[in-house]
Amino acid sequence: MEPQPASFQVAVPCCQPPPPPPPTHSPPKLDQSNFKRVGRREDPNPHPIPGLPADILHMRVKEGSKIRNLLRFAAARMQGPGQGGGGVLRQVVFTGSGRSLTKTITCVEILKRQVGGLHQVSKLCNNTVSEAWESLRKGVPGVTICRTVPALTILLSKDPLDPQEPGYQPPQRLHALPEEEEAERRDQAQPRDPHGTSSQHMAPGAKRVCLEEGNRDLPSTSSV
């Protein structure tokens, strides 16, 4: 019998490192000149402030909202009787997301000064926004873009809230100076003479008389 050729085996490691992941690229930005937005839907997360009544006044601040209209309605409900002869509301919630965050904070700060004594709880979370874009070119399909935007929820309450709750802020203490204190401040700011008498209340001829009396006591001098 002819001898069989020797077989060789290559040792293969039992644990091979996984192949490197393919490089990730950020999706290209949508060319808005060739698309138009036909729909927008925002899926909010569960309410970040649990335990609120279902009929609470909810002010949804949007990018195109007018601050004066929002404040006029909210202040009227918080300061006077509600619609339909209801009582004065004790709580209000402001919510905004994306580009309306700054406007939401502005509404809250102004209302706190108009009403006064409001406790505050602020919560920040994220919402998912889905936008549908339709192509302006024939034969090009539309696209749907999903993105995450920050959202802000602020509760204002006349009733005390839990100070241990994250995001709690106590009522602001606004000190308005009375007319008497303002007058005293103006009087203290006026210059005074060494004798402690305000120069504004001195008699018109007092300074002239003092100068004349001082001149009589000075020795006369003659020029050479």
Image (cartoon, helix red, strand yellow):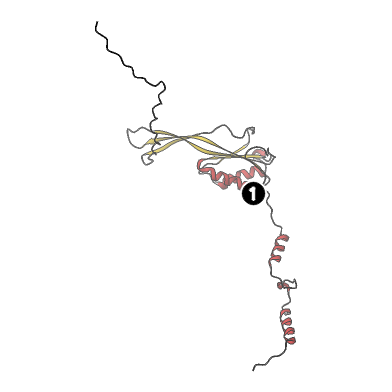
Q: Is residue 46 left or right of residue 209?
A: left
Q: Position of residue 175 (x, y in %)?
A: 69, 53
Q: Amino acid at mark 1?
A: Arg
Label 1 residue SS: helix
Q: Which of these two is toward me, 223 or 179? A: 223
Residue 15 lies in quadrant = top left
| Mark count | 1
Dot 1 surroundings within 10 Å: few (below 14), some, or many (20 or more)? Answer: some
Most extreme residue toward the top is: 1
Q: Nearer the viewer, residue 207 or 44?
A: 207
Q: Position of residue 173 (x, y in %)?
A: 68, 49
| Relative vertical location of residue 177 with respect to residue 152 in this rendering, above or below | below
Residue 153 location (% of width, % of height)? 58, 39
Residue 166 or 96: which is nearer the viewer? 166
Q: Position of residue 66 (x, y in %)?
A: 54, 46
With respect to residue 21, does 161 lie above or below?
A: below
Q: Which residue is mark 1?
A: 113
Left or right, residue 150 beside residue 50: left
Image quarter for residue 219?
Answer: bottom right
